[in-house]
Image: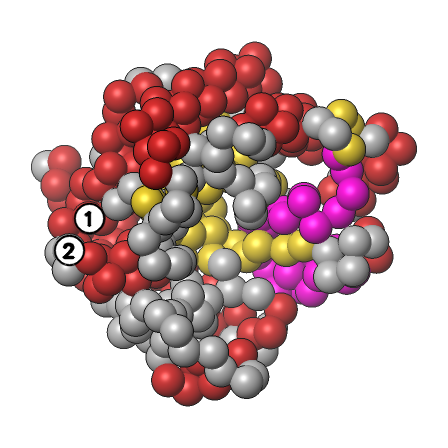
Amino acid sequence: MSNIIGTGFNAGSTNGEFESLEKELRILSEIGVDTVELGLTSLDLIAGGRIIEERADRLVALTKQFDFRYTVHGLVSSNFMEPETCRYQLDAAKALAQICDRIGAGILVQHGGNLRAEQIMERAEADAREREALFELAEFCKPYGVRVAFENIFTTEPGQYRQTPTQIAETVKTIGHPNLVALIDFSHAYIESTYRGLNFREELRAMASVAGHLHVHDSFGRPQAFYKGFHVQENTALGIGDLHMPLGWGDIDWEDIFSELTFLPGTVLMMEIGRRYHAEQPASLERAKGLMALNGRSAAIAAE
């Protein structure tokens, strides 16, 4: 049996209002997904680290209209290596953990941190600062039954310091908290492996044993570099960057990967394939269900 318990798509507000999120959730309900990852920082739910209760109540009421399993994506700008805002980010993340509890979400996504090239004096303490913040957040999440899913990101600017997927896994292992797991973003790992000359599949293997959440979307693993398309579709045409394409549009060998890797129990396969691809989402959903089944069969064979 697979340790992957569900699959679906991410959703958020397009204008900061609940109506656009509700519209997105209704579309996903019609498609037949069982799990939705909510981009809650697309709504004004938190101010200065404090929950805005009236808006949180509206969110709870909205989520109860649907029979989804929910996960939550935290601050997209999250960066626990950043000394000036780390405390503010922790306060916001803790508020998000409380909101997770109110809507029954068991996962809170936290991005891996980074330093800019000129932050030379911050480099020595960056990893320790991030580990301490992750431990504090995981400890805070413990009574709520929420797991922090620590996501691998790719280098986005010259000279940036950022951990590789293998180092993300090492961070999770070093902290060793039951409420902290790794989050494999396969496309991010592919892009970073290309950029650094790493072995993509080895990077995935390094993360799998501590991975409790998955972000799945297709790409060609080509770094963005300095190319800027006029339309976002021009990036797709060239196959450059973090494309978040439907499964099968890129060249990631999903079946081979999911027939090999084993993840932690309770893992969700979350497709970050957004509203731009509503027409293609049903096909990606069927393929994701196939990957779950394949992963389960492979795990059963390995256990024999």
The segment highlighted magenta reads 20-46
Q: Nearer the viewer, residue 166 or 281?
A: 166
Quadrant the N terminus occupies: top left
The answer to whether any part of residue 186 appears in the image is no
* Colouring chosen for the image of the structure: secondary structure
Tell me which residue sits at (18%, 45%) in the image: 205
Q: Would residue 34 appear left or right of 18 to someone viewing this image? A: left
Q: Amino acid at mark 1?
A: Glu
Q: Whole-percent x and y of residue 135?
A: 43, 18
Q: Nearer the viewer, residue 264 or 83?
A: 83
Q: Would residue 44 appear left or right of 33 to someone viewing this image? A: right
Quadrant the C terminus occupies: top left
Please name the residue that numbered disc 2 is placed on: 198
Tell me which residue sits at (51%, 64%) in the image: 273
Is the residue under label 1 in contact with that under label 2 (CB below 8 Å)?
yes
Q: Does residue 25 show up magenta in the picture? A: yes
Q: Would residue 240 appear left or right of 140 to someone viewing this image? A: left
Tell me which residue sits at (55%, 57%) in the image: 9
For the image, the number of numbered tags is: 2
Q: Secondary structure at mark 2?
A: loop
Q: Does residue 39 show up magenta in the picture? A: yes
Q: Secondary structure at mark 1?
A: helix
Q: Amino acid at mark 2?
A: Leu
Tell me which residue sits at (55%, 16%) in the image: 140
In the rendered structure, find residue 203 and report the number of the disc placed on it.
1
Query: What is the quadrant of residue 266 in the picture?
Result: top left
Q: Nearer the viewer, residue 113 or 159?
A: 159
Comes first in the chain, label 2 or label 1:
2
